[in-house]
Image: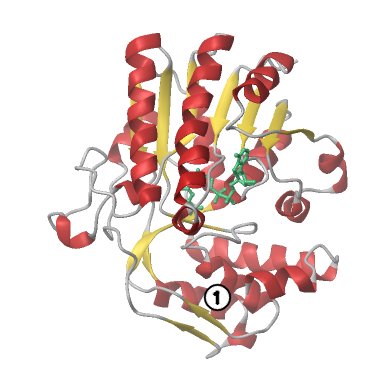
Amino acid sequence: MSEERFLVTGAHGAIGAWVIRNLLREGIPAFLFDQEGSNHRLRMILDAEELSRLETIHGDIVDLPDLEDAIRRFEVTHLIHLAALQLPFVKADPPQGAKVNVVGTVNIFEAAKHTGLKRVVYASSTAVYGEKSEYPDVSLPHDAPLKPHSLYGVFKQANEGTARVYFLDDGISSIGLRPYVVYGPGRDQGMTSTPTKAMLAAALGKPYHITYGGRYNLQYADDVAKIFIRAARAPFEGAGVFNLGGAAVSTQEVIACIETAAPEVKDKLTFDPSPLPFPQAIDNTALRQLLGRLPETPLQQGVAETIDVFKKAIVDGKISLDYTRAIL
Ligand SMILES: NC(=O)c1ccc[n+]([C@@H]2O[C@H](COP(=O)([O-])OP(=O)(O)OC[C@H]3O[C@@H](n4cnc5c(N)ncnc54)[C@H](O)[C@@H]3O)[C@@H](O)[C@H]2O)c1
């Protein structure tokens, strides 16, 4: 039997669902911790047998005893912390955003300390950086100055500081990973989710408007999940934070890939040319030095796979009309 036992917070979310899928397919015991009752993202990407093996804890990371119970009960050896409110939700309710994203992450480290876990892997974000114009015109290294413009980014910066202090005070090592734009089945909320929504629209043969242009690192959810799992297993001492990196693409390239995979939407996809308020090129050399070669699904393949999953989910009744109405 495997000696690894993973707890994944935010396991019902877009990245969390893919982390769970990867762990299940490796045969590793994985426990899901999420406040949200609906596991619609998992239902889209897991088969019936895999769904029957899920062990889910309906819990809130703001509640420290919930977390400690889960870690003890499942004899957790590896903790991947993904639960958070994304940028628009933090903007809509900053006090709640601070509770979940700041206090919640403090609780993760506190729970690790109380239960004797010596290692945490958690999601930070590219939103810890400022705008492109605030940096030299080079691929931005992981230790470039942090100048967040949003409370979401400020809270992620606080998490990075929290991680550092728990290493200094309590010897809990951590790896923080900063995704940029994650895409793939399940990426259905957050400021940068519109490229994936365009893929869902394409699966339905419908027009769609992507809300931003410019260049950005577009990261396939399955690759991102594999990197989180690899980080959780890497021998590492300290409090490291790393850019996830990957290929930088433009929205035009994303649309071209969607049109290749679903020619029926040719000329039906449009976009706003304004770039995202972050640097356009992010460097992941430090992460590659730590983990080696990183999984990187070619964009055309990732887009085609995503549209296929959506099409199959529509046929199988796993994507309801209410869901598509709510997110498109
Ligand atoms: N998706 C991206 O492009 C992206 C980019 C940068 C950083 N991130 C970070 O990666 C992580 C995962 O992102 P995602 O796209 O999967 O997000 P998501 O919004 O799809 O999922 C987040 C999950 O966290 C859960 N959650 C929220 N509050 C909770 C609480 N109090 N207790 C327990 N669970 C709670 C939600 O129910 C949800 O299932 C987040 O920390 C996010 O900030 C994501």
Quarter of the rendering occupied by the N terminus = top right
Q: Residue at x 65, y 40 (%)?
A: 11
Is 213 left, or right, of 97 in this rendering? left
Seen at 64% across and 27% down, the residue is 7
- Name the quadrant of the C terminus: bottom right
Give coordinates of residue 143: x percent, y percent.
22, 37
The residue under label 1 is 258
Relative to 263, is 328 above or below? above
Quarter holding residue 287:
top left
Q: Residue at x 65, y 68 (%)?
A: 307
Residue 325 x, y percent position in the rendering: 70, 75
49 over 281 or under it: above or below:
above
Position in image of residue 278 (x %, y %): 29, 59
Q: Is residue 214 above or below residue 150?
A: below
Q: Is residue 134 left or right of residue 295?
A: left
Count how many numbered circles sit on residues in the image: 1
Query: Which residue appears at 32% of the width and 13% of the height?
Result: 168
Q: Residues within 10 Å of mark 1 (few under 14, many from 20)?
A: many
Is label 1's Cβ within 8 Å of ligand 1?
no
Name the spot of residue 20 as percent of width and height, x first.
67, 38
Asked if residue 283 lies left or right of residue 318, the reply is: left
Q: Is residue 5 visible?
A: no
Looking at the picture, the colour scheme in use is secondary structure
Above or below, 126 against 22 in this view is: below
Mark 1 is on which residue type?
Ile
| Observer-nearest of 101 and 38 | 101
Q: Is residue 165 left or right of residue 104?
A: left
Instruction: Specify whether residue 148 is in view.
Output: yes
Outermost residue toward the left? 136
Q: Secondary structure at mark 1?
A: helix
